[in-house]
Amino acid sequence: MRDPNSFWSQDELDLTEKYLNQGYLITEVEDRTALKKIQRFVAITTAEYLGKTVDSEEIFLNDTHRLIRPEKLNPMRLHLMNSMNAQPWFRTQYYSLARNLLSTIVGNELAMQLRVNLSIQLPDDSSSLLPVHADVWSGDSPFEAVIWLPLVACYATKSMFLLPPEPAKRLHNRFSEFQNKSSEEIFKYVEPDLVWLELSYGEVLLFNQNLPHGNRINEETETRWSMNCRFKSVFSPYGDKKLGEFFEPIIIRPATSIGISYKSPTIE
């Protein structure tokens, strides 16, 4: 039962408890029109790059491996990233997919990564792997959270894995033992505890990037397409990725704007 003296609503309390316990939340996107616009833009831009046409965005994206070889993939991915991030509407539409979720978990005065990332993983392609890691290991702020968006259904090895909070604590407590070991040896240690996240098209993932995560070779018969972008409370501490260099404030409330610009009167 909700504490009547709590400042949180019951829905907020439920989301918070779930996020803290499992390290992630999967929900329906809050703006289906924005999702469709993003998916269509990516599919059409990809088709133009490859000299193809699109009948069904989802079928086209799932079957991308039939149209391009792994060694040609990264130049295309970089072209797509530059194209989508050049659209003035793109980041606002991406934010709208999880606006209320971010407000509950991260805050309502937010900084957003300047560029949304794009991942494409062809079946049986070992060149697009992200070994087990936590973003904070390489200098990210522990105050960040990631919005991860699938453009197609992502499941099993066509998705990503995450180490939940409790086993992550055990790894953290033994981390010195892995000082001279490879990421593959860390993976083998945590593998029994990993959660493979399954998302349908139309769902979005918010996860704690302090937790170890990554992907493996896509052993499914379809291509994985996903996007990711970091968000944080604008006034929380920053790591190596600074405000203005990597992050941009996107939501500043009027009272905060007034407070920032306020100067006390002087008496001479």
Image (cartoon, grey):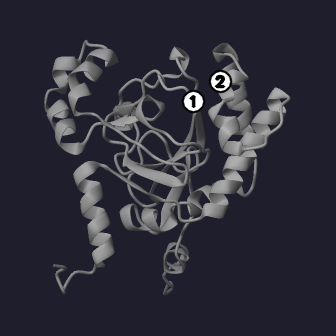
> Where in the figure is residue 251, as x and y percent of width and height?
55, 67
Quadrant into which the N terminus falls: bottom left
> Where in the figure is residue 68, as x and y percent of width and height?
71, 20
Which residue does the image show at 68% across and 16% down from the upper left? Answer: 69
Q: Amino acid at mark 2?
A: His
Secondary structure under badge 2? helix
The numbered mark, 2 or 1, whose residue comes first in the sequence reads 2
**Residue 122, numbered label:** none
Contact between labelled residues 1 and 2, with CB atoms less than 8 Å apart: yes
Which residue does the image show at 51% across and 57% down from the upper left? Answer: 111
Which residue does the image show at 39% across and 57% down from the upper left? Answer: 236
**Residue 222, numbered label:** 1
| Along the viewing direction, whichever of 256 and 37 lies nearer the viewer | 37
> Where in the figure is residue 66, as x and y percent of width and height?
69, 22
Is 83 on the left-hand or right-hand side of 104?
Answer: right
How far apart, in angstroms, are the residues tagged by discs 2 and 1?
A: 7 Å
Secondary structure under badge 1? loop
Q: Around disc 1, counting alpha carbons within 10 Å, would you say few (fewer than 14), some (14 to 19), or many (20 or more)?
A: many
